Image (tube, coloured by chain):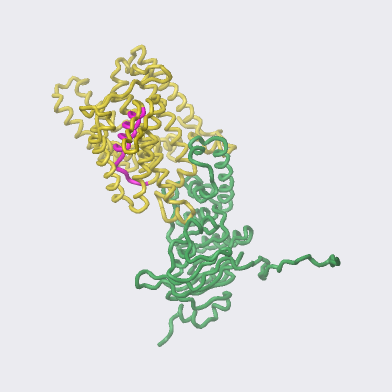
Chain colours: A yellow, B green
Amino acid sequence: MLYREAGQFKTTYSADMAIFPIRQDRIALYALLVFVFIGVPLLARFQIWPLGSDYMLRAILIPFLILSLAAIGVNILIGYCGQISLGSGAFMAIGAYSAYKFGTGIHIPLAWFGTEISIAPLPLIVSILLGGLMSAVVGILFGVPSLRIKGLYLAVATLAAQFFFDWVFLRVQWFTNYAPSGSVNAPELSIFGYLINSPIERYVLCLTFVTVFALIAKNLVRGNIGRQWMAIRDMDIAAELMGIRPLYAKLTAFAVSSFIVGVAGALWAFVYLGSWEPLAFNIDRSLQLLFMVIIGGLGSILGSFLGAAFILILPIMLDQIPHALGIPVGVETVSHLVFVVTGSLICYLLIVEPHGFARLWSITKERLRLWPYPY
Amino acid sequence: MNVDVGQPIAAEPAPERNPDGRAIGDVMLAVENVSLAFGGVKAISDVSFDIRKGEVRAIIGPNGAGKTSMLNVINGFYHPQGGTITFKGTRRHDMRPYIAASQGISRTFQNLALFKGMSTLDNIMAGRALKMRRGLMWQALRWGPALNEEIRNREAVEKIIDFLEIQHIRKAPVGKLPYGLQKRVELGRALAMEPDLLLLDEPMAGMNLEEKKDMSRYILTVNDLLGTTIALIEHDMGVVMDISDRVVVLEYGRKIADGTPDEVQRDQRVIDAYLGISH
C-alpha cells in the first residue's frame, strides 16, 4: 500500500532515467534531506532526544557519514568495476596527509638545484579536495597492475600500497612537518573566515560533502562510464571487443574511487579525529571499508550507507543494550560479546542474502509495491 | 560538349544484385593467408576468404575447425602469426579490439558474454559506449550536453529494443533471463554499435525451431534494412543454406570450400568432412 505507482506515467526518457523514478521515493528522499540538513541540527541545537548530547553527533553521525563516503569510493572500485582493493586505508591516509600538507603550507627544499618550492597554506575546502586529487593520482599509479592481474592477485598488489604508505607516513618526517611524536594536528577548520568548531557545524560540513559526492557517484555509475565499469566487471573480453578500453575504464575507476576515498580520509582526519597518527589508516581500516561494501551491497550507492551503518553503528548499539536493560555485565564482557554478536550477524546476513543490504532493500521494496498481493 | 541526356554521366558500376534485389558491393573485409597457432596447435593454417559489403557470409565446418578462432582474428582478440587482414581498404597484420570496434565490427559470442549484473537496457546501452563522447566531469554533473547525449542514445537503444521485441524485459537483470532472450539481448548489444560488419558466433545454438525462425528473421531484416554485412557461424545447415549468400567451409583450420550454398553443398570435400569418408 505504501507504493502505488498507478497513474505515474513517464513521457520522457529523462523522467524514466531519474534516480528515483517513483514519486513516493522522491518524496521520501526530499523529506530525508530536509530532516538531516535542518531537523538534525535543530534537534541537536535544542538538545532534544535522541540528540540530547554531543555524543550522538560526535561519535556516531559524523564517523558514519565519513565512512559512508569512503565506502562509496571503495564501492565504485570493487562493486562497480570489480577490482578488488585492500589499500583503501592507504588512500584515506594519502588524502589526509596531503590535505594536511596543503592546509599547513608546503615547503620542499631543493638544495641540489639551489632553489625551493613553497606553497602558502591553502583554504580548508581546497586542501581537502587537493588531498582527494593526490589520492587519485596515486590511485592511478597503483591501478596500473590491474591491467595485468585480476582478482585475489590484484588484492595482494593493492595490499602493497597499504603497507608502503603506512611506512611512508610513519618514517618520512616531512609529511608530519617533523612532529617529534609522529602525530599531527589538523589546521583550523575555517571556511571564508568562518570557524567550524561545534559538532553541529562539523556534522553539516560532512553531510554536505557526503551529499554532493553521493550524487556525483550516482551520476557516474548510471552514465556511460558506469556502464563501462560494470561491463569490465562482468565480462571484460566482451567489453573490450565492444570498444570499451580496459585501460581507460579501470584507471578512471581507480581515480574516481581513490579521489572519493581520499576526500573521506581528509575529512576523517580533519573533522573527526582532529589529531592523528598513521595508525588511524592501517590495514584494519581497509578491511573495515571492504566489509562495509560487501555487507552493504556490491554495486550499490545505497548499500555503501547501509554497510557503513551496520559495521559502525551496530557495535555501538549492542554495547549499550545491557546497560540500558540494567543487566549487570562487566564492560570487558560486553565488548567481547559485541564481537561475537556482530560476527555471527555478518555470517548470518551473508548466508541469507549474499548481495547485502541493498538487495534486501530492493526485494522489500518490490514486495511493498505489490502488497497485499503476492504478485 | 556533347552529352547524351539519357546516359548517366560518369556512371558508377552498378552494384551487383542478388536475385532478391539486395545490393552486394565490393569487398569489405579480406582475410589473406592467415595462420594462427597456439604453441604447437595450429588453429588456422593459411586461410583466405573475403566478405563483401551487404552480404550474409556463413562460416561453417565441423567442431574444432577454427571458425571461432577466425572471428577472434577478425575482431582483434587473437593475433595471427602470418597473413593479413584488410578491412575497409586498410591492410593490417593483425587487428586490435579497439580499432575493430571503432571501425565498425561488432560481435556476438558462442557462449553468451552478456554483462550479467546489468539490466537489458544497460547491456544494450553499453554497446553504445563508443558513441558517447562526453567526459567524466560532464557525466558527473549529468546535465546539459551529457544528459542530452544520454537521452539521444537511449532513443536509439529503444528502437533496437522495439525491433527485437524485448520491451517487457527492458529493466530486468539479464542474468535471470531465459537463454533465447539472452541471445536476443546480445544481438541487440551488437546492433547498438551500429556496425558495418556484424559477426555472429552461432546465433541459433541451443534454440528451438520457433526461436530459430525469429532469429533468422532478425538477421535478415538487419541485413536488408540497415545494409549491415553479416558473417555468421552456424551449425544448422538448413538455416545456413537458407539465409546466407556465400559460404566458406573450414576443416582442421584449412579452407576446403568457398562459394554459394548450392556449390558448397555439392562439393565432395564438404560432404566428406561432414559425413566422413569410408576407408
Percent coordinates x, y for residue A264 in the rendering: 35, 31
In the rendered view, tell whether residue A151 sits above or below residue A202: below
Percent coordinates x, y for residue B279 in the rendering: 40, 88
The magenta span reads A82-102
In the picture, measured across the screen, residue B275 lies left or right of residue A158, that is right
**Closer to the camera in the image, A99 or B134:** A99
- Name which residue lies at 42% across and 33% down: A214
- In the rendered image, the residue lying farthest to the top is A46
- Name which residue lies at 51% across and 30% down: A23
In the rendered view, tell whether residue A86 sits above or below residue A271: below
Q: Quadrant of residue B14?
A: bottom right
- In the rendered image, the residue lying farthest to the front is A114
On the question of residue B225 being in view, the answer is yes
Percent coordinates x, y for residue A238 in the rendering: 44, 55
- Name which residue lies at 55% across and 60% down: B214
**For the image shown, how many numbered marks are present on the structure?**
0
Q: Main secondary structure of the magenta part?
A: helix
**Closer to the camera in the image, A131 or B124:** A131
Quadrant where the C terminus of chain A lies? top left
Q: Would residue A154 be counted in the magenta stretch?
A: no
On the question of residue A60 being in view, the answer is no
Q: Quadrant of residue A263?
A: top left
Q: Would residue A85 be counted in the magenta stretch?
A: yes
**Closer to the camera in the image, A184 or A210:** A184
Percent coordinates x, y for residue A118 in the rendering: 37, 30
In the rendered view, tell whether residue B238 sits above or below residue A133: below
- In the rendered image, the residue lying farthest to the right is B2
In the picture, measured across the screen, residue A107 lies left or right of residue A322, that is right
**Closer to the camera in the image, B74 or A168:** A168
- Name which residue lies at 13% across and 24% down: A330
